Image: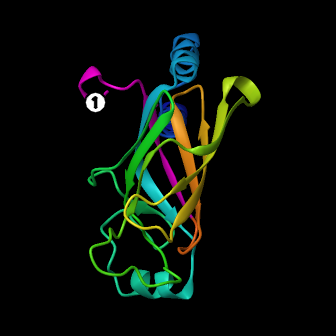
């Protein structure tokens, strides 16, 4: 009886440790390659990972983040957000958590928003069927904020977006990549 209980416990642990992310498959790898070749993709992020500063830690200590979030990892799955690449244009609307070094002014977005043709666009094949995309972009609503964007796309269709800003603290996003729906083109 003890052996059966021990075996059952071990089985539950192995099943519980399985990843919730889609696994690598040749089909996903082909889909990602097609998105890169067509330069037609959309990333929806589910986590924002701001730089941990004392101000962010104070917000976390005050309990101002939703359940499942900490000062260094914020659940944004319920926020509307995206980064879309279609041919030579990129458009993004991402929530921002962190510190701003310069004032935002009136009628400016609190998030990271850009739209247009990126400067210095580079798309490279990475290790193990991954892809790396780099570009520079100016803020959609401000002439003072410029972004250096680095995107890593993995063959299991997950993504990491890192954004370095000229007037905000750095932030990273984790999410999933998929082909653009025809109504968003």
The residue under label 1 is 184
Q: Is residue 184 left or right of residue 15?
A: left
Q: Which residues are magenta?
A: 171-185
Rendered view: 64 above or below 38: below
Bin the neighbour count of mark 1 within 10 Å (Cα to Cα): few under 14, some 14-19, many 20 and up.
few
Image height of 115 relative to 61, above or below: above
Q: Is residue 1 at all visible to an observer of this figure?
A: no
Q: Is residue 163 magenta?
A: no
Side of 77 where 22 appears, left or right: right
Residue at 50 percent of width and 84 percent of height: 102
Query: Whole-percent x and y of residue 37?
Result: 57, 18
Q: Residue furthest left?
A: 183
Q: Tag 1's secondary structure?
A: helix
Q: Residue at x 73, y 31 (%)?
A: 126
Direction from residue 149 to residue 56 in the image, left or right: left
Which of the pair 43/85 is nearer the observer? 85
Q: Is the C terminus in the top left, top right, bottom left or bottom right quadrant? A: top left
């Amino acid at each position: 009886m003890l052996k059966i209980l021990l075996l059952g416990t071990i089985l539950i642990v192995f099943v519980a440790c399985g990843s919730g992310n889609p696994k690598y498959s040749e089909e996903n790898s082909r889909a990602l390659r097609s998105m890169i070749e067509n330069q037609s993709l959309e990333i929806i992020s589910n986590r924002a990972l701001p730089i941990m500063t004392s101000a962010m830690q104070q917000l976390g200590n005050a309990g101002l983040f939703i359940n499942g979030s900490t000062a260094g990892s914020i659940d944004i799955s319920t926020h509307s957000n995206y980064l879309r690449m279609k041919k030579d244009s990129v458009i993004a609307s991402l929530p921002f958590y962190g510190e701003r070094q310069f004032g935002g002014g009136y009628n400016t977005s609190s998030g990271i928003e850009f739209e247009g043709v990126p400067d210095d666009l580079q798309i490279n094949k990475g290790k193990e069927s991954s892809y790396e995309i780099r570009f520079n972009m100016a803020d959609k609503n401000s002439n003072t904020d410029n972004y250096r964007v680095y995107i890593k796309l993995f063959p299991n269709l997950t993504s990491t977006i890192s954004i370095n800003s000229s007037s905000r603290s750095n932030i990273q996003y984790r999410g999933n990549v998929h082909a653009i729906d025809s109504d968003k083109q």
